[in-house]
């Protein structure tokens, strides 16, 4: 095997492996260095896939618990969850998908170099731990991703004070769980473990849950969580956490400045993720960095020629770069196409869908009502509840709504925000609408099949014009 490649990718997460496949499809010789035992990175091994598998188990339990409503007769006793089977099924799904990437690497003649990569300069990448060797590359793509991080006063011990990496593997359902942070990861685990039987409390520093979402979505989620028995302490700052023999003691500051003590069997820290660049040698090679993130331009070029970077590890200088699997993959495709000389356009980060798979689900894209007003639009809103739809009633999933934010002057769709059944799927139509700069009228004139959940999108569009048919 030659050590010289057109492209060497460091990291086989959703950014790196997709970049590698596209580069190979476009005719480059490609190697990917990955230090884990499997390909797929955070998304496949610790993130998107295992969490959504757990959520499907939580949903299955919900259906079984409602068996009487469905006319299903169960033996006497209260149904419960078998964590052994849950993990066996989840792990089988993860293994199947990671092996699938190995297959795709073989199909595209991509070499997987097992080990930890370190940049050496002049197009050289040294493998410092694993299959020791030096690779030569015409182009290098850094896609080393991110790892969980904590907040001051909270030290992760991975037993009582855990991150999502541990929370996906718990063999027993904790009787009580405090979750720090109400972003996507925090509220997804709240839904999972509440359904499995834990007493769940979410502590959020900002005044509302899922603070990046439209305010109406946060309010609806808070209402639903309250019904489900998930406690939300918003506007609350955790100042310290101590692991004890039986659990965790937390100190928090309430919105009115009082100190509150909380205790639980376990604390899940879901306060965000930081870049993985330690030991990579990026700074030593003169690559411009910002708080550990690699700085890139809109085409993912770092400050050093022939070194690009994508995914969770990058910052673009303006705003917060979204740490999402589909963003990293799209960046991977763009960078591979640029390196192959294809004419590529920068990604529009305002069209990135946000999907949060809590129960009820959230799907959103574009401007929130507040953001649209801040930008000076004459805003029109249309909202339609899922509960009116026949399809939602059949499924027994009647919570939530679709909200469309539009511009009165040109009737342009500026943002679509939904909470309720299948929202993470339904948002795809909204993403396309924004990409094609659709008007509300175009959504109204698009035929939505009946009976489907998607009728809520069409009705919300009618509602923008003050003329929803079924409300
Ligand atoms: C619990 C959880 C749930 C999530 N759910 C979703 C979701 O539903 N949808 C969504 O879009 N996103 C989700 N995400 C976010 C998503 O997983 C990340 O945005 C995505 O994985 C980022 O991809 P990446 O390729 O940039 O980095 P990563 O996936 O982190 O991959 C980086 C890879 O680089 C390797 N690596 C690092 N340094 C080196 C080195 N020096 N040498 C060799 N290899 C190295 C790592 O081992 C890793 O495999 C979730 C994240 C978490 C934690």
Image: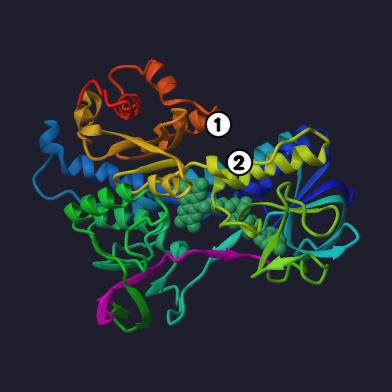
Q: Is residue 264 magenta?
A: yes
Callout 2: SS:
loop
**Residue 73 shows in this picture:** no
Q: Which residue position is annotated with label 2?
A: 348
Depth check, front residue: 92 or 428: 428
Q: Which residue position is annotated with label 1?
A: 435
272 horizontally vs 454: left or right: right
Magenta-drawn segment = 254-277
Which residue appears at 71% of the width and 60% of the height? 295
Instruction: From the top left corner, tell me how far across and down residue 309 is, in percent.
Output: 72, 54
Depth check, front residue: 459 or 119: 459
420 horizontally vs 293: left or right: left
Q: How is the image coloured?
A: rainbow
| Residues packed near mark 1 inside 10 Å, few (<14), some (14 to 19) or many (20 plus) | some
314 horizontally vs 214: left or right: right
In whole angstroms, how far apart are the C-alphas of marks 1 and 2?
Answer: 9 Å
Which numbered marker is on residue 283? none
């Amino acid at each position: 095997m030659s050590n010289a490649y057109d492209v060497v990718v460091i990291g086989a997460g959703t950014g790196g492996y997709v970049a590698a496949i596209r580069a190979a499809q476009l005719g480059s010789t490609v190697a990917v260095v990955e230090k884990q035992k499997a390909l797929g990175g955070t998304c496949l091994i610790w993130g998107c896939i295992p969490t959504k598998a757990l959520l499907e188990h939580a949903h299955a339990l919900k259906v079984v618990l409602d068996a009487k409503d469905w006319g299903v007769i169960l033996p006497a006793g209260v149904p419960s969850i078998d964590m052994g089977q849950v993990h066996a099924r989840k792990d089988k799904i993860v293994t199947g998908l990671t092996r699938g990437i190995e297959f795709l690497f073989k199909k595209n003649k991509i070499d997987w170099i097992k080990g930890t990569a370190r940049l050496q300069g002049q197009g050289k990448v040294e493998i410092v731990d694993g299959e020791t060797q030096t690779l030569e590359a015409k182009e290098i793509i850094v896609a080393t991703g991110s790892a969980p991080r904590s907040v001051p006063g909270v030290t992760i011990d991975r037993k009582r004070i855990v991150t999502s990496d541990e929370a996906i593997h718990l063999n027993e359902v904790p009787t009580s769980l405090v979750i720090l942070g109400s972003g996507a990861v925090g509220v997804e685990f709240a839904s999972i473990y509440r359904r499995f039987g834990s007493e769940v409390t979410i502590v959020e520093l900002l005044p509302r849950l899922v603070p990046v979402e439209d305010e109406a979505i946060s309010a609806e989620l808070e209402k639903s969580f309250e019904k489900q028995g998930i406690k939300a302490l918003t506007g609350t700052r955790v100042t310290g956490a101590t692991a004890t023999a039986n659990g965790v003691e937390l100190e928090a500051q309430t919105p009115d400045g009082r100190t509150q003590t909380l205790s639980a069997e376990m604390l899940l820290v879901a306060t965000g993720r930081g870049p993985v660049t330690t030991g990579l040698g990026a700074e030593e090679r003169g690559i411009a960095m910002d708080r550990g993130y690699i700085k890139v331009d809109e085409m993912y070029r770092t400050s050093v020629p022939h070194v690009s970077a994508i995914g969770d590890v990058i910052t673009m200088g303006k705003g917060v770069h979204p740490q999402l699997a589909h963003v990293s993959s799209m960046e991977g495709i763009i960078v591979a196409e640029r390196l192959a000389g294809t004419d590529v356009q920068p990604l529009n980060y305002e069209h990135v869908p946000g999907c949060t798979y809590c129960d009820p689900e959230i799907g959103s894209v574009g401007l929130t009502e507040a953001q649209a007003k801040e930008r000076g639009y004459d805003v029109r809103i249309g909202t339609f509840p899922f509960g009116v739809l026949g399809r939602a009633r059949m499924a027994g999933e009647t919570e939530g709504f679709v909200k469309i934010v539009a511009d009165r002057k040109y009737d342009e769709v500026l943002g679509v925000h939904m909470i309720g059944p299948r929202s993470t799927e339904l948002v795809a139509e909204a993403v396309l609408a924004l990409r094609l700069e659709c008007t509300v009228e175009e959504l109204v004139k698009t035929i939505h099949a009946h009976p489907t959940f998607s009728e809520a999108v069409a009705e919300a569009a009618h509602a923008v014009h003050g003329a929803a048919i079924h409300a």
